Image (cartoon, helix red, strand yellow):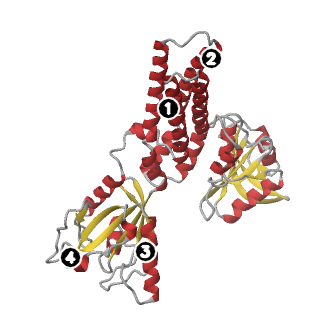
Amino acid sequence: MLNDTIAAIATPLGEGGLAVVRVSGPEALAVAGRCFAPAGRNNLSPAAAASHTVHFGHIVRDGQKLDEVLLTVLRAPRTMTREDVVEISCHGGLLPAKLVLDTLLSQGARLAHPGEFTQRAFLNGRIDLTQAEAVNDLIHSRTELALAMASEQLSGKLSRLINQMRDRLLGLMAQVEAHIDFPEEDIAPQTREQLLRELSESTAQMERLLETAREGRILRQGISVAIIGLPNAGKSSLLNQLLGFDRAIISPQAGTTRDTIEVFANLRGLPLLLTDTAGLREAADPIEQEGVRRSLEALARADLVLQVVDASQNRAASADPPLPGLKGKARIRILNKIDLPGAHLEFEPDGIPTIPVSCQTGQGIEALKEAIKKLVWAGGVAAEMLEVMINSRHQELLAKARQSAHAAAAGLQDALPLELAAMDLRRAINFLGEIVGKTITEDLLDSIFSQFCIGK
């Protein structure tokens, strides 16, 4: 597939000032040249143009000018794919970009698959697999912390750390295999101790990296937060306060919210998917019954529950009914309406963080935001942590590598045949290699790059 030439629209579909159509492959310059008419004395055809130059002209099809464009020539290997690349900036909008793309396809290019440009960058050795994944993370970043994490990974810092660990294990395996080749010479006690010490340091490094998985998942996928409570407790008002604008309708009348409302929020650098739910109560109205059912579904999916309590009511009236979906959930109890006379602010100690707020005045909202961040985020965000936050694929492979390294250490400790230790070390090396793409399968490539948008 690397022998053909691919093309795709690289900018989001829709109306806008500009759209960019990208072409990559051995025939990129020729394909573009067959439909590009340069304008002006100093503008050249793509084949005659120097690398990294921009040229003004028109895209032409069947003798008709389709659009006025700027064409950028990027010659291999100094391109994102290490192939010849042409990028055509045309007018934004669905039709101009589509006509330009269709013209390129009619001249011999093939429509690119999702993520195929980045996949070619990986297959041609410009980036490794963790950097390719970082491209997708960068595109989907919703907070500055997530963006910083993706940028650090794209720069190759995680790759370098994984490769250092792999190289270290390769050195250890070479020592073990050297002793296998000369079985008449037993491993000296000091040599065995050195191998065990280096294996221990390697597994400790894997442990430290595995500890970043939870924070990495939070920044990549966000935290699902369900706002629950009785009718008229102030759930929709709380949603509006956390967002900083009015998203949900609020009313003194109980039962205003009949359906779940989902909206993304950036809370102090953390991506949250907030779900405002219908009030939890026995309902006779079929519509309200459906709203309660959806509320319970949102509760079951949530990583964090914000349980809103009306502090102006007596405890019996404000307490939520027992819900099996709450068991084992991270939860914050929010005492709302503390600005009203007679509000009660005390609960029996039960280990649940309890924050008094007024969604009417905004009192306590900043303390609530801090409590949310403290509950879902383990400590501060050190720069070195952002550099190497792993994703779920990395986590699975690192855990397997650690297990194999532990097995190798146990074999050396118990003086088992050295062939067993070498086998375990080779497994650990292969698992680490799969993280950066040194060992790879076609199915894994398809799985990773199918998540990308077309044109990237």
Above or below residue 370? Residue 234 is: below
Q: Nearer the viewer, mark 1 or mark 4?
A: 1
Furthest residue to the bottom? 284
Quadrant hosting residue 355? bottom left
The circle drawn on residue 175 is none
Does residue 267 appear in the picture of this structure? yes
Residue drawn 39% across the image and 38% down it: 383
Q: Amino acid at mark 2?
A: Ile
Residue drawn 75% across the image and 61% down it: 99
Dot 3 falls on a residue whose secondary structure is helix
The quarter of the image holding the N terminus is: top right
- Earlier-in-chain disc, 2 versus 3: 2
Q: Which residue is mark 3?
A: 295
- Earlier-in-chain disc, 4 versus 2: 2
The circle drawn on residue 406 is 1
- Earlier-in-chain disc, 1 versus 4: 4
| For the residues bearing labels 1 and 2, Cβ distance under 8 angstroms | no
Above or below residue 325? Residue 84 is: above
- Earlier-in-chain disc, 1 versus 2: 2
Residue drawn 53% across the image and 33% down it: 162
| For the residues bearing labels 1 and 4, Cβ distance under 8 angstroms | no
* Disc 1/disc 2 C-alpha distance (Å): 20 Å
Q: Amino acid at mark 1?
A: His
Q: Residues within 10 Å of mark 2 (few under 14, many from 20)?
A: some
* Disc 2/disc 3 C-alpha distance (Å): 63 Å
Q: Amino acid at mark 3?
A: Ser
Q: Which residue is mark 2?
A: 180
Q: Which residue is mark 4?
A: 315
Q: Residues within 10 Å of mark 3 (few under 14, many from 20)?
A: many
Q: Nearer the viewer, mark 3 or mark 4?
A: 4
